[in-house]
Amino acid sequence: MIEALYYVKKEDKRVLCTLCPHGCRIEPGEYGFCMARKNIGGVLYSENYGKISSLALDPIEKKPFNRFMPGSYVLSFGMFGCNMNCPFCQNYRISRTRPPVETMTAEDIVQIAENTKSRGNIGVAYTYNEPLIGYEFVLDCCKKVKESGMKNILVSNGFLSSKPLEELIPYVDAANIDLKCYDQKTYKDTIGGELKVVKNTVKKMFQAGVHVEVTMLIVPDVNDRPEEFEEATEFLAELSCEIPLHISRYFPARMYDKPPTDIRLMDRLKKIAERRLRYVYLGNV
Ligand code: SF4
């Protein structure tokens, strides 16, 4: 646990976290919405710093990336916590509960990444839970990975404030950003985010030269209207028709028990996306 970046001390030992647009005001002894940042005596701490809940050497396609160093592997780790609250979360165990963890340093991560180069590893992926609420550890790892000449790969919901995003971008080689839906009301009421913030993350990363791919998990009665989906593809195509889009199939999870996404709908959405985008993939099918 280390003192957090991006917060402001307030009266009576309260703090204001400015890492993500939730802007949590946190009382002493309490956590922010993400359950990873805690106010202890008027100081905000990043509680999941180096607390590794999962670590694996994954094929890059599993992240998913289909157009970034295909055929390679990446050392992937997750911590715990999330700053969104999707009822259909497919990673609930580490996102909204406290999983068993192993404590590691950024140096440990880089060492394992180096040791697995011979097995095809190209770098480190920050993934599984929402990595950016463990910003301090991600940033420390990113700096060391960059120094070692390997790649930094981010898999994120993209819900981060502008300043920390700008600080991180120079270290990121590739990012897969989850676009949860294309409707601000659904983002706010169902998911706990903001569409315009996530769009801004995609745009800023792409314009900074990061290799960006986008994933949309299609969830029945949440974001499965073809018209809404088409608007999302228009947004991506305005940036570039070369941005790969992964259309992922939902399966019942957490407190959402609708049946899995209809395969016929997945095929229809793929055809809609292919009108504007060159690289469209179906996932979990
Ligand atoms: S990072 Fe966590 S504590 Fe900070 S504003 Fe976002 S949800 Fe709240």
Image (cartoon, rainbow, N blue to C red):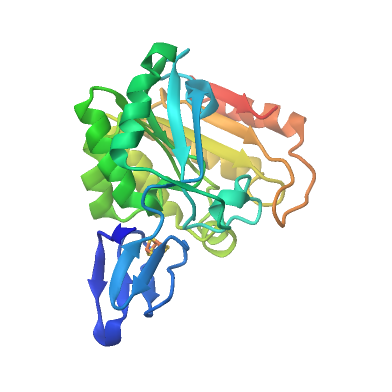
* As drawn, 73 above or below 185: above
Q: Residue drawn 74% across and 46% down? A: 252
- Indicate which quadrant contains ligand 1: bottom left
Residue 77 in the image, given as x and y percentages of width and height: 45, 37
Closest to the observer, 91 or 68: 91
Quadrant where the N terminus is found in the figure = bottom left
Q: Is residue 180 above or below residue 110?
A: below
Residue shown at the point (50%, 30%) measured from the top left = 56
Report x, y in % for residue 31: 44, 70
Residue 13 placement, left or right of 78: left
- Whole-percent x, y for residue 51 in the image: 43, 49
Q: Is residue 208 visible?
A: no
Q: Residue furthest right?
A: 259
The residue at the point 23 percent across, 54 percent down is: 163
Q: Is residue 276 above or below residue 216?
A: above
Asked if residue 45 shows in the view, the reply is yes
Left or right: 28 in relation to 215: left
Picture coordinates of residue 237 (x, y %)?
A: 42, 31
Viewed as shown, does residue 125 lie left or right of 139? right
Q: Residue at x 42, y 27 (%)?
A: 243
Instruction: Say which quadrant the C terminus sits in.
Output: top right
Q: Please state which of residues 132 and 233 is positioned toward the viewer in this rendering.
A: 132
In this view, the residue farthest toward the bottom is 12
